[in-house]
Amino acid sequence: MTRNIGKWLISGPPVFYLAVFFVIPTFIMVLASFRHAGEFGGLAPIFLHDVRGAHLNLTLESYREYFSDFIYSRLFIKTLIYALVTTFFCLVTAYPLALLIAGSEKRHRDLLVLLVILPFWSNFLIRIYAWMIILGPQSALSVGLNGFLGMFGIEPVGLLFTPFAVVLCLIYVQLPFMVLPLYANLEKHDPALLDAAQDLGANSWQRFWRITFPLSLPGVYAGIALVFIPVLGIFAVPDILGGTGGIMIGNLIKQEFLEARDWPFGSALSIILTLGALCIVGVAAMVAGRTVKNDA
Amino acid sequence: MALLELRNIVRSFGDFAAVDGVSMMIESGEFFTLLGPSGCGKTTLLRMIAGFDAPQSGEILLDGKDLVATPPEKRPIHTVFQSYALFPHMTVAQNIAFPLRMRKIGKAEINERVKEALDDVRLSDRGGRFPGELSGGQRQRVALARALVSRPRLLLLDEPLAALDMKLREQMQLELINLQKEVGITFIYVTHDQTEALALSHRIAVMNGGKVEQLDEPSKIYDCPRNRFVADFIGTCNLIEAKVTVAGEEKMVLEIDGLGEVTARNPGGELTGSKGVLALRPEKIKIGQQIALESGENRFRGKVHDFLYMGDVTVYIVEVGEGVHIEALLPNSAAGRPRIFAAGDPVEISWRYDAGVFLND
């Protein structure tokens, strides 16, 4: 009995917190997506008293709007592609880095991990604005690149306000979220396994591909989830670096709430995004689960 | 030609000479053991044979060809690691197939050889299990099967039984001997456990401080230790400070402080006046109330100082002369008599002259 009380004392506050600030808001969003927009923004009343008497004032209008115009799905697909490209480059950049940190001497490791998380100490927006300068038309990068292209008679290109700028910055912003779970996994590997593999005839590539990589898959999956899902909803990076052509679904949701003041449609977009992400992650987890079982 | 020849191997870490000029020859089909206390260089030597470390000077010859420049994955030598190092993400069958897959052997042949290897270590029904689902002894057998399946020239075993409990260890020792006989592959076995070394090996190299103290058959190592370290490290041994007074061809007379004259075997070449120790195994000493003196025996009167009842035997520590303590074993062969003598009882001990050997300092 006392043990039960203790359990509730410990798990009660977080359960309460999640219920109030996660479950209830999600429920409000789901409900809002089925309501009408208010005349001056916000939401129309949920109960109406009119000639038909008292009735619920709900509609599928927002979902109908999403599916009636392909432009929204196209934006969703574009966002998915950005997220996939970002995740891929984060993985191929972070993996060698995590291997390097995990393989370095113990006394250097903490410092290297600190360097990875150092960017978090400055403001997110400031770091994105810094990319405006790095990619701007007068930047050394732009001038150098265009000078190089000019030698082959190619027209100068703009780097800023392009999908390239958006994805580049997304990779930069998300990279630590890939490095940390990979490092946490790789650091725990037993070096004797690699000795054994080498002893049994595996060269360095085979040792990586047959031992290190399969054993690191839990870290890879965690990193992918931590990078892919947040990118789907991000809006600050495309807002600042994407220009007119670089917007993502997160920008549209933000616009619906703040500028168009169409809360139901904004809610519907959020719900579709959440369900879409859940489906993708679910399918990926199933596929991953199967390959792990077959391979192992 | 020897299968493996080590020539004057030196490996130091900073100022510390882990392996200090070791030379030995290991014959094909041999069960060879490197025995010594921790830090004696046996594991460093093993790692150099496997290729994970390189000697600073010296040669490692396999079939007469120098191996030093060959990386571990190219050497026809496999290791059974102390921690087994089984791949946790692969099944038992996949673990055993690993060295074959690295050699790009066809699927059908791999399956056949894995099945054979599983049969050899009596794990035919465990092929689909993961290492985490096996007991310690089973993991040990998988590690053996994995290292033997591609038929290496040489198998290195780094304290493979250290993680098992005593009952299982004894059983695995018998299995190891039989397995080695069956496959006919040369084993180099590293251990700090002298009973294990005596039980398993054809020959033993006793190592200390990076050097080989004695390299011989188990019975020679036990009965004719070449120096104080070997006598002390292998089994239990009475080591009594002594001085040679008369050195004969085969026998010698020793003077021991507080005890007097003792006849012992001359290991060869000892001269009158040398100082050293008399090494005397406890089980070779007779103990009784009164012992008839036979020719060629040493006999002393003393009293029981202390004793340890071990079940199968009782260890008596007998004080003879002034302050000389000699340990003697008495098997508890008669039923219902846990001890024959108590502390303080007067006893006589005796031993044949050739039970004791003089070891020069």
Image (cartoon, rainbow, N blue to C red):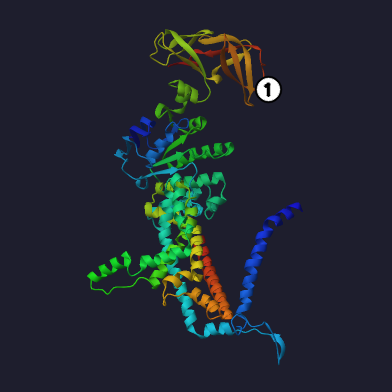
Residue B57 found in image quarter? top left
Q: B351 and B229: which one is in front?
A: B229
**In the figure, B254 relative to B22: above or below?**
above
- Where does residue A271 sit, x and y in percent of width and height? 57, 75
Q: As drawn, which residue projects farthest toward the bottom?
A: A51
Q: Residue at x 43, y 46 (%)?
A: A108
Q: Residue at x 35, y 69 (%)?
A: A136
Dot 1 lies on which element? loop
Q: A52 and B249: which one is in front?
A: A52
Can I make out residue B132 in this image?
yes
* Residue bearing mark 1: B338
Left or right: where does residue B106 sit relative to residue A1?
Answer: left
**In the figure, B143 relative to B34: above or below?**
below
Q: A16 and A180: which one is in front?
A: A16
- Where does residue B327 sit, x and y in percent of width and height? 57, 18
Q: As drawn, which residue projects farthest toward the right?
A: A1
- Where does residue B329 sit, x and y in percent of width and height? 59, 20
Q: Neighbour class for label 1 at 10 Å: few (<14), some, many (≥20)? A: some
**In the figure, A284 relative to B233: above or below?**
below
Residue B301 found in image quarter? top right
Left or right: where does residue A171 sit relative to residue A35?
Answer: left
**In the figure, B42 relative to A238: above or below?**
above
**What type is the residue that disc 1 sits on?**
Pro
- Where does residue A95 sit, x and y in percent of width and height? 43, 57
Chain letter, disc 1 residue: B
